[in-house]
Image (cartoon, rainbow, N blue to C red):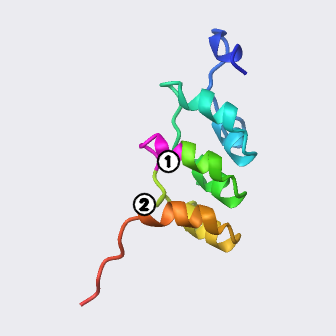
Amino acid sequence: MRLLPARGDVSPDKLTNCGRAPLWFASQNGHEGAVRLLLARDEVNPDKPDINGRTPLGWASAHGHDGTVRLLLARGNVSPDKPDKSGQTPLGIASKNMHGQIAALLQPRTAPLSRMD
């Protein structure tokens, strides 16, 4: 994994036909070491959605990978409020899949609800 980005013909942010980048696969599967390596690269967009609009944070949240969620949130330019094409946010996905620890991580970071007067 460390050697591939050093090659000139390998892009660490290149999309597959399904619109998924290496960070997406690493996040979905909870490979924290790979996520850490990819996030260290300037050319990797940590908030890039796949063709269904789900970001690496959304997939890590869906599969209960709290360490990966922490790494993505620490990057600072990852939105916990970004909905996928079906309108689900990472918080909603984590809650739906009963990943309470991840929901707790995402809860204080989401935008406050606006009051209706």
Does the magenta run of residues contain 87? no
Tell me residue 84's x, y (percent): 57, 60
User: Which residue is found at the position 63% from the left and 11% from the top?
Assistant: 6
Q: Are marks 2 and 1 in contact (CB under 8 Å)?
A: yes
* Relative height, residue 67 to residue 97 (above, below): above
- Which residue is found at the position 76% from the left and 45% from the top? 29
Please name the residue that numbered disc 2 is placed on: 109
Residue 54 versus residue 70: which sits nearer the camera?
70
SS state under label 1: helix
**Cα gap from disc 2 to disc 1, whole angstroms:** 9 Å
Q: Which residue is mark 1?
A: 73
Residue plotted at (70% across, 16% down): 4
The spot of residue 113 in percent (x, y) is: 36, 75
Taking the image as drawn, is residue 51 in sight?
no
**Is the residue 116 above or below the residue 67 in the image?**
below
Q: Is residue 77 left or right of residue 17?
A: left
Of 19 and 115, which appears nearest the observer? 115
Q: Which residues are magenta?
A: 72-78
Which quadrant of the view contains residue 71?
top right
Q: Is residue 15 left or right of residue 113?
A: right
Quarter of the image containing the C terminus?
Answer: bottom left
Mark 1: which amino acid? Leu
Picture layout, residue 91 above or below residue 26: below
Position of residue 7 measured from the top left corner of the image (x, y, whole percent): 66, 9
Residue placed most toward the observer, 33 or 50: 33
In the picture, the quarter occupied by the N terminus is top right
Residue depicted at 28% across the width and 87% down the height: 116
Q: Can see residue 78?
A: yes
Give amino acid for label 2. Arg
Q: Badge 2, how many Cα within 10 Å: few under 14, some, many 20+?
A: few
Disc 2 is placed on an element classified as: helix
Residue 89: image quadrant is bottom right
